[in-house]
Amino acid sequence: MNNKNKDIQEIINHLKATGFVFQGSEIYGGLANTWDYGPLGSLLSRNVKNMWWKEFITKDPSNYALDTKILMNPKVWEASGHVANFSDPLIENKKNNKRYRADHIVEELFPEIDVNKFTKKELSDFIKENVKKYDNSDTDWSEIKEFHLMFETFQGVVIDKKEKIYLRPETAQGIFVNFKNVLRSTRSKLPFGVGQIGKSFRNEVTPGNFIFRTREFEQMELEIFSKPEESMEIYKKYLEKVWQFILKLGIKEKSIRFREHKEEELAHYSKATSDIEFLFPFGWGELLGVAHRGDFDLSAHSNFSGENLEYLDPITNTKYLPHVIEPSIGLDRLILALIVDSFEKETIENNETRIVLKLNKNISPYKVAILPLVKKLSENAYKIFEHLLEHDISATFDDSGTIGKRYRRQDSIGTYYSVTYDYDSLEDGKVTVRNRDTMEQERIEIKNLVNYLRK
Ligand code: GAP
């Protein structure tokens, strides 16, 4: 089924029932737009992070790992421009006292119009002129205000001497401020990359669409430092690399597309930026971005910190600021995309419908389920289960309910194989392995099971 025709509420209900995603602080009535990963969502998220880590860090000898803190010296955010510029245009409907992202209103109602061309005043005039009813209400629009997205907090123990600091809105700056440390400690030559996975926080005006836009989210970011003249080639290489990564995770090619930012849309420091968009049930939306950041960040941090962040080229003996290419992926959006893309309802035998999450077997919460045909066979089957766990194969065990029901349960959480231990297994030392997608079954020798599942 086309993702656009999938029912997001049905997916959310399914994710709650099966233990992928729960509403945050639910027993207290929740906290708006916060979501917790349950037992299965946590496994899925861990598997996706591992794939990213392997693909972008461990498999590439020129890329290094980093793990920097959420709290940073507030001067970092002055240098990066976030204190002065990181805001969204907010407009209030005085008829119902609700606040909205002005640009989102225009994007939603007039998709043919490019909002990036508007100045703030033009955007405000356009909405006043053209949007007389919105969100089921008549309108009386305020002027547009810039709403700052940085999360503020305070550190220190003495009440009147607390210092205002921020929760980071991106993990990238932790990498830039450590550029010199990484360069020195790894004794690297350009080009090289530095990546990390971690939480970021933005006080979004309009969070929503489930885990698509939240105020706390996780990013997987990589900053590749290179000679200025090599940077465009690296930018193109990474556009292709992230595209292939998304396909490798199992997302269908028809569900994604590139969107290159137009010149007027580019951040003032960026030479080029492209997003990969994904077709969500609520329409095409940004999944990730690849940005050419030039030398903006290193130059800003050199100026603000007084530390010279130039690179001494060992061949030409000249000093210059490297340019930066940044593929930045939002983990939560990627998880939503993976679930939406793999969620299917199929009619099978006896006119029964099954929900199946056709997740790539390397990221499914469980690769295999061990299912004894009847409870009497549980003890033997459990030994197989333990054997698989010892061999690092992600497995689950289920001996309650009919075998048909148990297959459905595993299909609905994306388990790739179901292994049934039956009376014949006692005699022939074989089990039945059922494939989630084809539902075909084959008999496999128990002693070959680990190899079979690994292939
Ligand atoms: N360091 C560059 C940077 O942060 P961005 O386009 O603002 O760039 C990168 O964010 C990615 O982070 C986005 O493509 C998206 O996947 C994710 N992201 C950004 N804001 C988010 C939010 N409020 N909720 C969930 N994911 C978000």
Image (spheres, rainbow, N blue to C red):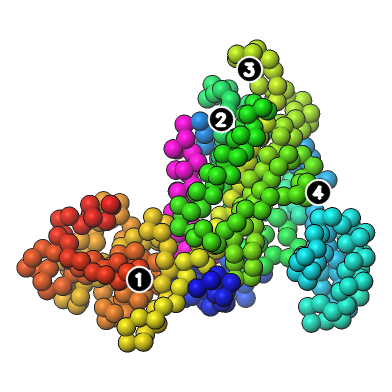
Task: Indicate whether 57 appears above or below 284.
Answer: above
Measured as percent of width and height from the top left, residue 40 is found at 43, 64
Q: Is residue 428 left or right of residue 2?
A: left
Magenta stretch holds residue 136:
no
Measured as percent of width and height from the top left, residue 94 is found at 89, 74
The residue tagged 4 is 264
**Distance between mark 2 and mark 1 Cα atoms:** 42 Å
Question: What type is the residue that disc 3 sits on?
Answer: Asp
Q: Is residue 100 left or right of residue 48?
A: right
Q: Which mark is residue 410?
A: 1
- In the displayed orientation, state which residue is furthest to the bottom: 350
Badge 4 local density, few (<14 within 10 Å), some, or many (20+)? few
Nearest to N terminus: mark 3 or mark 1: 3
Nearest to N terminus: mark 4 or mark 3: 4
Disc 4 residue: CB within 8 Å of ligand 1: no
**Distance between mark 2 and mark 4 Cα atoms:** 30 Å
Q: Please report the bounds of the magenta region as a residue range.
A: 36-61
Question: What type is the residue that disc 4 sits on?
Answer: Glu
> Could you tell me if residue 199 is visible in this image?
no
Measured as percent of width and height from the top left, residue 318 is found at 68, 15
Nearest to N terminus: mark 2 or mark 1: 2
The residue tagged 2 is 192
Question: What type is the residue that disc 1 sits on?
Answer: Gln
**Residue at point 28%, 52% (across, down):** 454
Q: Which mark is residue 313?
A: 3
Magenta stretch holds residue 55:
yes
Measured as percent of width and height from the top left, residue 385 is found at 24, 61
Badge 3 local density, few (<14 within 10 Å), some, or many (20+)? few
Determine whether the residue tagged by mark 3 lies in a helix, strand or loop.
loop
